[in-house]
Amino acid sequence: MLSALMDAVEARTNYANPANWFKDYFLGGEESTSGIRVSGPTALTYAAVYRAVNLISDYVGKIPLVLYKRTSGNEKEPDKNHPAYRLLRFKPHPVITAFPFRKTLQSHALLHGSGYAWIARDGAARPLDMTPLDPVVTYPEIVNGRLWYVTIVENKPYKILPENIFHLRGLPKNGIECYSVIGRASESIGLGLAARKYGAKFFKNNGFSKLALEHPGRLSSEARKGIRDSWMEIHSGLENAHKPIVLEEAMKIHAFTMNMEDAQFLETRQFEIREIANWFGLPPHKLGDTTRTAFASLEQENQSLLDDCLDPWFCAWEEECRDKLLTEAEKEADSHVVEFKRQALIRANMVDRSNSYRVAVGGPWMAANEVRALENMPAIDGGDELVKPLNSQNPGGNPDVTGKGPPKEPTGQPKRQDLLAAARGVVVDAARRAYRRLAVHAKRAAEKPQAFLGWLEALEQEHLRSIAEIFGPGIASARTLADISMTTEELCQSFVDVVRDALLDLSGKHQADTLAAGVAECMARFEAEGPEKIADELIQQVVTYTAAAEGA
C-alpha cells in the first residue's frame, strides 16, 4: 500500500522525496521550530485556524451561487433549464447539497491551497454531478505538454482530463499548482499550538513549571525517585491546587519559574491570533481579537472582510464555474454568467447601498435600470434614461433663451400609467386588509348565532372609523392624480354596507350550526374578489376625470 501511494505521488514536486512524503503523511506533518508538527488535522485543533477556515467556508457556502442567462442589455435571469443551475444552486451531488459542497471545497482550498471536485458528465458532455476529492492525494501534472489531474481512490491512481476537474485555486505557484497555507504558516500555527500546550502543562503542574527540592543529605537513586513521584502525585493538577506542603528532614524548596506575565504568555497567544488572521486575510476581530478594533473602525473592518477576503474567493468560484460548467458555444457568445448573490451578504448595509444608488441615479451617472440590474431586478419602463438634474432644467416653463425650442419634459419621471398602477396597488392592499379585519370579527360573532344580528347592527359604529383609516392612503394617492368625486367616507360607507347586506342575507339562509361556516366562506370570497373590484372602480373614476379634463 505504501509503495503504491508513493509511486502515485512521486511526480509531485513537494513529494518527490519519499522521506518528505512519509514525514507528512505518517508523522503528522513538518516539525516547526517550536517542536510541534503541523498538518491539516493538527492545524484545525488550533481555535484561530478552525475559526478562520470555518468562517470563510460558511460565507462561501451560504451565499447563493446562481447561473444567469443574459437576455438583453444589462438584464439577466436565472437559467433554470441549464443542467449546471441545479448543481450550483441546490444539489451538486446525489447526497450532498450546495452548502456543504461549497464549504468542503472552500475549506480544502484554505488549508491545502486547492479544492478539487470530479465532474461527471452524460453522453452529451453535460454536467450531471460533482464529487469532492481529497486534496491530499489529488494533484495536477503535465504529461507530454498536456495537463492532467491525478487522484488516488482505494490505493489506485487515476488520471482525469482537466475539463472534468473543478479546481478551486488559492495562491498559485505557477497558475496550476498552489501553495498550501498550512505548509507556509506552519511556524505561526506551531507557535500557537505550543503556547496552548505550554498553558495546559502549566496548569497541569499546578502553576509550578520548575522546582528544586533540596535535601541536606545524600540520597540514593531510589530515594530521589520516590520523593519526586510523591511530590507529583500530591501537588500536580488543578484539583490539588493550594494543598499544604509538608517538608521533612530539613528539605528546602527552590523555584526556578518565571511568572506568566514575565513570559508574556497571554500576549503571545493574542499576537498569534492576529498572525493567523493575516494568513487568511481576515480582520482580527473576526477571530476574537478586539484589542485594536474601535466602534468607529468596525464598519471599515467588516467592509475589508468583503473586499479583501471574500470577494477574491467569490471571483475564483465564478471563473471556475464558467470555465468548467458552460459549453464552448456559451462561453464564446458570453450568453451566461455565474454569480454569487453578493447582495445577500451585505443585506445589513441596505441603508448605505440605497444612499449610494440614490446619489448615482440623481447624479446622474447611472440609470434606474442599471441599479435594478445590479440588484438582479427586472427593468421598468423609462428606466434606461438618465435623470436630468433639476438645476439644469428651465424653471417655470419660461421660453428657452438659447433658441433651441421649448423646454423638454424631464426624463426619468414616473408616467401617469405607472402612478395609476401604484395607486391601484395601494387600494387593493387596503381593501384586502379591511376585508380581513371584518372577517375576523364576523367569524367570531357567528360562533354565537343568537348575537350575530346584533353584531351586524353595530358593524358601522364599531368598524367604520378603522376602515376609513385603512383606506385613507389609497384615496389620498388617487386624489393626487385627479379630483375624484368619491370621498373616503363614501367609499368606506359603501364598503361596510355591501358586507353587512351580504352577511344579513346569509344569516337568513343558514341554521345556527352552519352559520359560522357560511360566514367564513362568504368573507373568503370577499377577500379574494372584492379588493380588485373596489380598486378598479376607484381608478376608473380617475381615468374618467382625467380624460374629461384633457378634452376640455
Image (cartoon, rainbow, N blue to C red):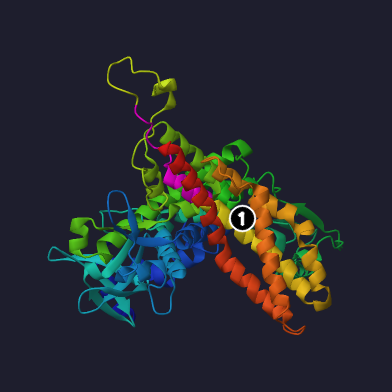
Which quadrant of the figure has residue 323?
bottom left
Residue 434 horizontal/vertical position (percent): 66, 59
Asked whether the viewer can see residue 48, the reply is no
Residue shown at 41% from the left, 28% from the top? 389
- Circle 1: residue type: Ala
On screen, 244 above or below 92? above
User: Outermost residue, top direction?
Assistant: 401
Which residue corresponds to the image point at 55% horizontal and 40% vertical from the top-left?
A: 483
Name the foreground residue: 365 vs 496: 496
Q: Would you say residue 420 sits in the magenta stretch? A: yes
Q: How many marks?
A: 1
Q: Is residue 406 above or below residue 532?
A: above
Displayed quadrant of residue 505: bottom right
- Judged from the image, the secondary structure of the residue bearing numbered disc 1 is helix
Q: Quadrant where the N terminus lies?
A: bottom left
Q: Is residue 504 magenta?
A: no
Residue farthest to the front? 552
Extreme-left residue of the structure: 144
The one nearer the camera, 318 or 240, is 318
Q: Residues within 10 Å of mark 1 (few under 14, many from 20)?
A: many
- Give the percent coordinates (x, y) of residue 46: 55, 60
> Residue 18 falls in which quadrant of the image?
bottom left
Residue 252, image x, y percentages: 81, 56
535 left or right of 217?
Answer: left
Q: Could you say where residue 161 lies in the image, as x and y percent from the top left?
A: 21, 71
Taking the image as shown, residue 260 lies to the left or right of residue 166, namely right
Q: Is residue 426 at all visible to an observer of this figure?
A: yes
Classify the position of the C terminus by image quarter: top left
Q: Which residue is mark 1?
A: 430
| Magenta part of the chain | 408-423
Q: Residue at x 80, y 78 (%)?
A: 449
